[in-house]
Image (spheres, helix red, strand yellow):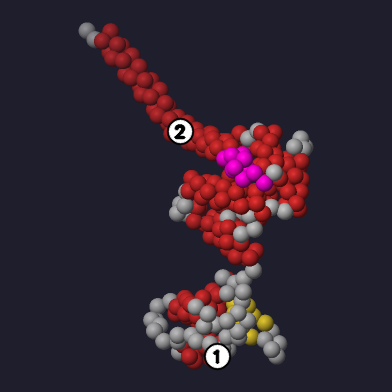
């Protein structure tokens, strides 16, 4: 085990200590399941207080880099995040960046199309019968007339998650977390008023049929059709959301114009009465 204990500045000690331990984990100096020194030992080596060490360890635990265990064989150990945990972290980080304006939905849509296009080609070669069955069930669910809008959107997400999983590439599966788990549900709920459910189900069926036939070119064409329609619907939803803002901006202007005309009319009327009463 090797952690660099020197080189700290007095500002933000907990953050610096967390970064040093994190660097040791990422570089392999600290192995998975390896136990870290105790809080007291870390405090002595870093020459800081134990509360500062606790704060640093909390930061690492929040990133799923370490875990704690009680008992005689307990302590703090280097953790190995699961695929699901890593996906969730990426999804949350992407959603946060979008909400802060660091990433635009247009960027996300472009990334999603490129990722799914690649997955689509690979899925045509690698999909399993079980994954085709999952897709088939989602399409049937989407054709149910009593299905709520929220459940329809959830089914749409599951269909495309299965498409990505059918590529059987863990790196692509992880990369898709930010554009599928984080944002597809929100975008779906934004555009549902403009969506034709039957059309979506038919587009999904076309993708499914192409994958079943292992026809990557046809699958890609069907996916492109789906994405083109979704882009148009998203633009329509954006325009509809902007319309109330425009109306709100123009209403005061119109009111000001009416008030100005009324004031002008009153002024002219007063001038006329003044002239009649003049000797």
- SS at circle 1: helix
- The residue range painted magenta reads 214-224
Percent x, y of residue 231 = 54, 39
> How far apart are the alpha carbons under marks 2 and 1?
61 Å
Residue positioned 68% across, 50% down in the render: 158
Percent x, y of residue 223 = 60, 42
Residue 221 part of the magenta segment? yes
Percent x, y of residue 8 = 40, 83
Q: Earlier in the sequence, mark 2 or mark 1?
A: 1
**Main SS, magenta residues:** helix
**For mark 2, what is the residue?**
246
Label 2: how many Cα within 10 Å (few below 14, some 14–19, many 20+): few
Instruction: Kindly indicate the quadrant of the structure image that contains residue 188.
Output: top right
Vertical relation: 240 (above or below) 130: above
Q: Quadrant of the C terminus?
A: top left
Residue positioned 40% across, 29% down in the render: 253
**For mark 1, what is the residue?**
40
Image disc number at residue 165: none
Nearer-the-camera pick, 202 or 41: 202
User: Position of 102 compared to 33: left or right?
Assistant: left
């Amino acid at each position: 085990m090797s952690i660099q204990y020197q080189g700290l500045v007095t500002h933000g000690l907990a953050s610096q200590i967390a970064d040093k331990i994190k660097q040791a984990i990422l570089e392999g100096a600290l192995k998975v399941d390896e136990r870290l020194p105790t809080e007291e030992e870390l405090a002595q080596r870093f020459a800081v207080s134990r509360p500062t060490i606790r704060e640093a360890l909390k930061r690492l635990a929040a990133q799923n880099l370490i875990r704690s265990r009680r008992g005689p064989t307990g302590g703090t150990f280097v953790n190995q995040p699961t695929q699901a945990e890593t996906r969730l972290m990426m999804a949350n980080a992407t959603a946060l960046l979008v909400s802060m304006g660091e990433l635009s939905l247009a960027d996300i849509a472009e990334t999603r199309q490129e990722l799914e296009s690649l997955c689509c080609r690979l899925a045509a070669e690698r999909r399993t019968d079980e994954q085709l069955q999952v897709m088939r069930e989602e399409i049937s669910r989407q054709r149910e007339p009593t299905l709520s809008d929220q459940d329809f959107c959830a089914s749409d997400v599951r269909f495309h998650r299965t498409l990505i999983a059918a590529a059987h590439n863990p790196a692509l599966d992880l990369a898709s977390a930010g554009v599928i788990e984080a944002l597809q549900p929100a975008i779906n709920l934004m555009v549902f008023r403009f969506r034709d459910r039957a059309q979506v189900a038919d587009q999904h069926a076309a993708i499914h049929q192409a994958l079943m036939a292992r026809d990557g070119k046809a699958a890609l064409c069907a996916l492109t059709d789906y994405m083109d329609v979704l882009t148009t619907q998203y633009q329509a939803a954006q325009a509809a959301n902007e319309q109330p803002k425009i109306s709100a901006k123009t209403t005061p202007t119109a009111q000001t114009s009416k008030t100005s005309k009324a004031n002008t009319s009153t002024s002219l009327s007063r001038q006329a009465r003044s002239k009649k009463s003049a000797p």
